[in-house]
Image (cartoon, grey):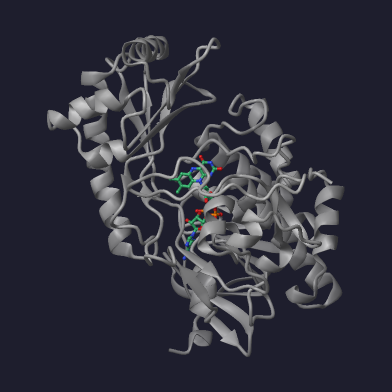
Amino acid sequence: MDYTKLPVFAEAEVVVCGGGTAGAFAAKAAADMGRDVLIVEQFGSLGGTATNGLVLPIMHTHIPQNPQCSYISNIVRDKMIALGAASANGANFDPLVLKAVLEGMCDEAGVKILLHTFIAETVVNDGKLEAIVVANKNGLGIIKGKMFIDATGDGDICVRAGAGYTKGNPETGKNQPISLRYMVSNVDIDALGMFIKELMEKSGKNSGASYDADGSVYVACCAGDKWTFSDVFDEAIANGDLTEDDKAYWQGFMVTGRKHTLAFNNPEFFDETDGTDPTHLTKTQIAGKQRILRQLQFYKKYLKGFENAYVSDIAAMVGIRESRNIETEYVLSASDLLRRVKFDDMFCQSNYPVDIHGKVLHCENIKEPVDDGKPWYEIPYRSLVVKGFDNLFITGRCLGAEFLAQSSLRVQHSCRASGEAAGIASAIALDKGILPREVDGKEVRGIMIEKGAHFVL
Ligand SMILES: Cc1cc2nc3c(=O)[nH]c(=O)nc-3n(C[C@H](O)[C@H](O)[C@H](O)COP(=O)(O)OP(=O)(O)OC[C@H]3O[C@@H](n4cnc5c(N)ncnc54)[C@H](O)[C@@H]3O)c2cc1C
C-alpha cells in the first residue's frame, strides 16, 4: 500500500511517538528549545507506565546524591508537591495527578497533544523517516515530521521503519515477566502495621516488611521462606486460596496523596511475557484481574487491616519491564554497566542494580560492580541515536542497551532523562541542520544542566 496517498492528519518539526514516561519529557524538552512539537499517544492520557501502568515510586539511583539528570523532573516534582500528590523528593506520587500535571506541562510548553491515536506503520525514504501512519476515529492517515522520537517503550516506530533490535534474555530468548498493577484502598494501615510486628515476633523473620514510626508500611514476599509473610502465603497456598505464582512476587507500597491506600507491584506473569504480542497483553490483562480479586480475598482472610478494603484501581496498561531494544550508534553493554564505564557524551548517571525478575527472583545484585571511586554507570547520548537513520531517536526502556544493562536502566529516572536528552538533541539537529549522530552529546548535557538538571560532576 502506498501510505503517502493517505490524508495528512498533522505535521510538526518534532514528532514524539508515544506519550509515556520518556515521551512527555521529550516533547516538553523539544518545545522548550523553541520547536514545533506534536506528541501522539494511543491511550487517553500522558504518562504511560508511570500513570496508566500505575507504576510508582521512582526508584532511587543508588547514588548518594540521587541525581535525577533531568530539569523537567524538578518541575514535575515541584508541581506534584504543590498539589499534595508527591513525597518531598518527588519519588512517591499519585499516578492520576501525574497525568494532569504532564498534560498541563506539555500544553503550557506549546506541545500539540494527539491522544487516542495508534501508530501502526512508517514511511521511510533512504534512511529518513518521512511520516508515521496512524489509525484513529478518522480512519488511517499520516503524520509528517522532520525529526521523530520513538518513545513507545517497545521501539514500535524503529521496528516498523526497519531498524535492528534485540529482544529478551539472550540465554532463554524470554522477556522479563509482565505485571498488572493495582491499588487497594480503605486499608487500616496501623492494624496492618501491628500485624507485621506480630508476624515478625512469631516467625523471627524480618525480610520484606516494615512498619515505621511515621506510620508507613511496606510489604513484600517472594519464593523461599525467609520473608516475614512466607508462612502466611504458604498456608494460603496449602488451603488452595493462592497459587505459587501469587507468592513468587508480591510487593506493596503506600501512595503519597492517597490515604489508606497500597499500590501492589503484582500479580506477575512468568509465561506470557512478550509485550509486543497482543495475545500475551490480552491474556495478562484478563487473567490479571482475576488474580487481583483472588489476592484481595486473601488479604481479607489471612491479613489484618483489610476488613473493609476494596480494589480502587487496576492498571489500564499491563506493565512491560522489557521487550525490544533498538540498535543504536552505541549499544550499552552489560560489561559497560558492571564496570561502571564513563562516557564523554553521557546524559544519565545511575547505580540502580541489575534487576532481572523470574520464577526465582534475583533480589540482590547478580554481580558486584567494579568500584572506581565513582559508584555509578553512565548512559551515552549515542544510545539514543538509531543506527542507519538520519532523523530518528529512541528513548525510554527500549534505548540501545543489552538485556542485562536494560534491567537496570529501565527505571523511571533514566527513561525521563533519555526523553529529555532526545528532545534537546532533536532541536539542536534542526537548529544546526545536522544529523542526530552528528550532535555533540556534551552540548546536550550542557543544556540539561543549564536548565537545572543535576549530575554528579
Ligand atoms: C511492573 C513494573 C514495575 C516497575 N517498577 C518500577 C518502579 O518501582 N520504579 C521505577 O522507577 N521504575 C519501575 N519500572 C520501570 C519503569 O516504570 C518503566 O520502564 C518506564 O516507565 C518505561 O518508560 P517508557 O517511556 O520507556 O515507556 P512508557 O512509559 O510505557 O511509555 C510508552 C508510551 O507509548 C505509548 N505507545 C506505545 N506504543 C504505541 C503506539 N504504537 N502508538 C501510540 N502510542 C504508543 C504507550 O501507550 C505509552 O504511553 C517498572 C516497570 C514495570 C512494568
User: Measured along the vertical axis of the image, is residue 72 above or below residue 121?
Assistant: above
User: Measured along the vertical axis of the image, is residue 38 above or below residue 308?
Assistant: below
Q: Residue at x 52, y 58 (%)?
A: 404
Q: Residue at x 24, y 34 (%)?
A: 293
Using residue 153 as the reference point, say whether residue 139 is left or right of it.
Answer: left
Q: Residue at x 14, y 30 (%)?
A: 238
Q: Quadrant of residue 222?
A: top left
Spot occupied by residue 162 in the image (x, y as percentages of width and height):
52, 81
Using residue 416 as the reference point, say whether residue 196 is left or right of it.
Answer: left
User: Measured along the vertical axis of the image, is residue 251 above or below residue 448?
Assistant: above
User: Measured along the vertical axis of the image, is residue 131 above or below residue 243?
Assistant: below
Depth check: give the residue in front, 254 or 51. 254
Depth check: give the residue in front, 255 or 118. 255
Using residue 152 as the reference point, say whether residue 88 is left or right of it.
Answer: right
Depth check: give the residue in front, 424 or 34. 424
Quarter holding the N terminus is bottom left
Spot occupied by residue 414 in the image (x, y as percentages of width and height):
64, 50
Whether residue 444 can be seen here: yes
